[in-house]
Image (cartoon, rainbow, N blue to C red):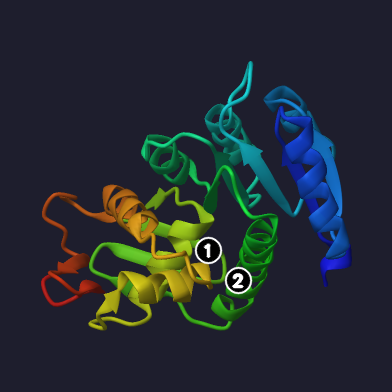
Amino acid sequence: MNAKQRVLVVDDEVGIRQVVELYLTREGFEVELVADGAAALRAIERAAPNLMILDVMMPGLDGLEVTRQARAKLNVPIIMLTSRAEDVDKIVGLELGADDYVTKPFNPRELVARVKAVLRRSSDKPAAQAQSSVITVGDLTVDPQSRTVTVKGQPVELTAKNFDLLWLFVSHPGQVFTREQLLDQVWGYDFYGDTNTVTVHIRRLRQRIEPDPDQPTYIQTVWSVGYKFSSDSV
């Protein structure tokens, strides 16, 4: 499977590019290396990669801007690399549509594991969802085959990960999911105890589908436990 998967690695540090290439190549991936954001966007237009590993801090176009522009072109999975201690880059990156992030310095084996997990999830989810029917709850309609969402008949733009998260909720109404369970079901691997990514995606999803994100109707918080999708009050 991996032999046909192409990964675009974007980082201005040559040492990091070389290490990532070495570990990914050992696992059978085809790897393309670029050193800046502008080159990354050209590489995407030339031949869409199966996944992009993208450094946040780069001269010129930084990783956040590259993510924003890449998301307007195609739905390539993105793993962001960040060396900042603050969570702001991680949160902004996830809200822009990144699928995962890894903090520098990182274990190359961990990065490879995350690459495999993101690729597996991105390929498995659409196939499973295509076998399911359209679900409508109140003003919200979710079509798993076309991977489209509408609210009051108007299309809603969602990242691939937010769609997967929403589909898990609407296809299991009333079931309470812990943040760890959501990580396992949607991201498909151990997120090393960091459940902040779930909180970010839930907030972003509520902003897209809820009439009032501050008083959510669909995705409700179950205090001290997690979240559930409710159709009772719709």
Residue 37: which quarter of the image?
A: top right
* Quarter of the figure with the N terminus: bottom right
Q: Position of residue 27 (x, y in %)?
A: 83, 65
Q: Name the residue under label 2.
A: 126
Element type where label 1 sits in the image? loop
Q: Name the residue rendered at 47%, 70% in the picture.
A: 186
Residue 193, compared with residue 41, is above or below; it is below
Q: Which residue is drawn at 41% across and 66% down?
A: 165
Q: Which is in the foreground here, disc 1 or disc 2?
A: 2
The disc label shown at residue 219, or none:
none
For the C terminus, the image quarter is: bottom left
The residue shown at (69%, 66%) is 116
Q: Where is residue 191 in the image (x, y as percent from the top left)?
A: 47, 64
Taking 202 as reference, is 116 above or below it? below
Q: Which amino acid does label 2 sit on?
A: Pro
Residue, disc 1: 147
The answer to whether residue 144 is seen in the rendering is: yes
Secondary structure of the residue carrying numbered label 2: helix
Q: Residue at x 77, y 26 (%)?
A: 39
Q: Is residue 153 visible?
A: no
Image height of 164 relative to 62, above or below: below
Sequence-first disc among 1 and 2: 2
Where is residue 58 drawn, in percent x and y? 62, 24
